[in-house]
Image (tube, grey):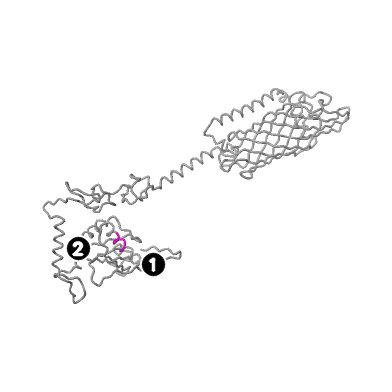
Amino acid sequence: MLLYPIGTYTELYIYIFHNPVVKFFTMKKILLLGTFLVGLVWCQAQDEKSNTSSRTTKSQFEIGIHGGVPFVGGEVTPEIGYGGGIHIRLPLDHIFSVRLDGLYAMAKGNRLTTPPRSFENTWISGTLLGILTLNNMRFDRPIRKTNIYFMGGVGINSTEVSFSNEENRMGNLKSETSPHATAGAGIAFRLSKKINIGIEHSTSLVLGNRADLLDGSTRSGGERSAFGDSFNYTNLRINFNIGGANKSEPLYWVNPFEIALADISKKANSRADLAISDSDDDGVIDVLDQEPDTAPDAIVDTKGRTLDSDRDGVPDHQDMEPYYTPRPGERINNQGVVENPIVSGGVTEDRVRELIDEALNRFEAPVTNSSNTTNVTGGVNMTDLFLPMVHFASASDVVKYSDYGALASIARVIKGTPNLRIAVIGHTDQTGDESTNNELSYNRALAVIDHLVNNHGVSRGQLVLMWAGQGEALVPSTASYMNRRVEFRVASPEDVEQDPPSFNLDGNGNEDDGY
């Protein structure tokens, strides 16, 4: 910051300290001003301490080293000296902070007049400063890249001055301790989260009988100086932020809105997670789920409520007869099966079974038809027995809820005819490659068989798994819904269970999706 000759600074200080406005401020008033600034910072610290929601305790603090050029503004022309020290700085909030400075400096001066005058001043001081950050009230970015600040405070110094007076006599003012008031300004530049550098200038005014003796002289132009000398220090600082990784940078670097924005973002992310969460894994997100704690295997409706299709009090996933609604007076067991069926104007279930058995007993042994081999008994062709198809979504082998009723009816027919064998044949539409569709048609037939066996107790031996892939389309459309089906027919003696097709794997060793 020493951009001009030293003499220019001297003239500037002489002008300032002889200005009538400056003379208005006595040393006592400057001390009172410094005390006021320190008190203001202390009150701010107490306020922050009492505020439990503040993140001050989660903020890092700063330590630093500094070195620069000291000079004395007085009656003797200053020369370049040297100085250095350390400091520690604590943030109170985003605007205020306090800093404790230690300084050792050697200031010099020499005026080639008649008689000549010169001095050397050894300065050792400690200063408590309140710092006001000026540019942290802008909210356009989370972290500031620069930090502009003013400071003021008070401290204690020890000075020892060696000098030659007007009569060219050498003298020495022994070390003496005096209070001082300090003011200054600076700018710091953020290099990283841990390091910043700064340029700063401060001026200290000594209080007491040493106020006009920092250059070893109390006269200017033959007159006693009207104002005390000033000790000035222009320096470069390297600062380090100290604290754990979970703490923020010192708050004078941080946008005051940053904490609020972080909290808002955290809450927004939490609400987003809540909006798409499905705690009971029933396929209905919690926001829409009216029954958020359904059993893992429960069948639910679009609002997440456990389905009880026949309204018998037994949920569908536990009901062996999920689509049979009990009539008044009928009693069901814990599997949803009626224990005391009431017949009104009809026949009982047991009588129906007897009728079926009697009809089967009347069938004759199978004979060979001239055209093909079928089950022909008593002149009745068993292949004429109609069983409904079930259909599947594209690229799916999952049995749809809408087909549960049809499968329940098929199960009753099969269980009521123990000697009956049923061929269960899977099909696909004509999209996709042939090997993938063969695999998908097999999986669809297997899914239907597993449903009949697990949910309705059908004997696995009565079911013959067969698959046809895409080769037996009902309609010519390549992607017709009618082609994605499982058919049922009475098995002939020649019908045997088919082996699974070889799986079609992709380049990663996973099964390809079907159609």
Residue 135 appears at what percent x and percent y? 61, 37
Q: Residue lying at the far left in this picture: please name it.
A: 345
Instruction: State the SS at label 2.
Output: loop
Compared to 377, does 243 lie above or below?
above
Magenta region's main secondary structure?
Answer: helix
From this viewpoint, which residue is outermost toward the bottom? 370
Which of the labelled discs sits on residue 503, or is there none?
1
Which is more toward the observer, 267 or 455?
455
The answer to which of marks 2 and 1 sits earlier in the sequence is 2
Judged left or right of residue 139, residue 440 is left
Give the residue drawn at x 88%, y 28%: 169
Q: Which mark is residue 417?
A: 2
Q: Is residue 491 left or right of residue 174?
A: left
In reply to whether residue 436 is colored magenta, the answer given is: no
- What element does badge 1 sit on? loop
Is residue 53 shown left or right of residue 131?
A: left
On the picture, is 342 further left or further right than 69? Answer: left
Percent across and percent down for residue 474 are 28, 67
Type of the residue with mark 2: Thr
Q: In which quarter of the view is residue 182 placed?
A: top right
Q: Which mark lies nearer to you, 2 or 1?
A: 2
Disc number placed over residue 432 in the picture, else none? none
Q: Quadrant of the C terminus?
A: bottom left
Q: Could you tell me the amino acid type at mark 1?
A: Phe
- Residue 450, image x, y percentages: 30, 60
Q: Quadrant of the N terminus?
A: top right
For marks 2 and 1, give the CA distance.
Answer: 35 Å
Pick whichever, 427 or 378, lies toward us. 378
State the extent of the magenta-drawn residues as a range: 445-450
Res 168 quadrant in image: top right
| Crowding at mark 2 (Cα within 10 Å: few <14, some 14-19, many 20+) | some
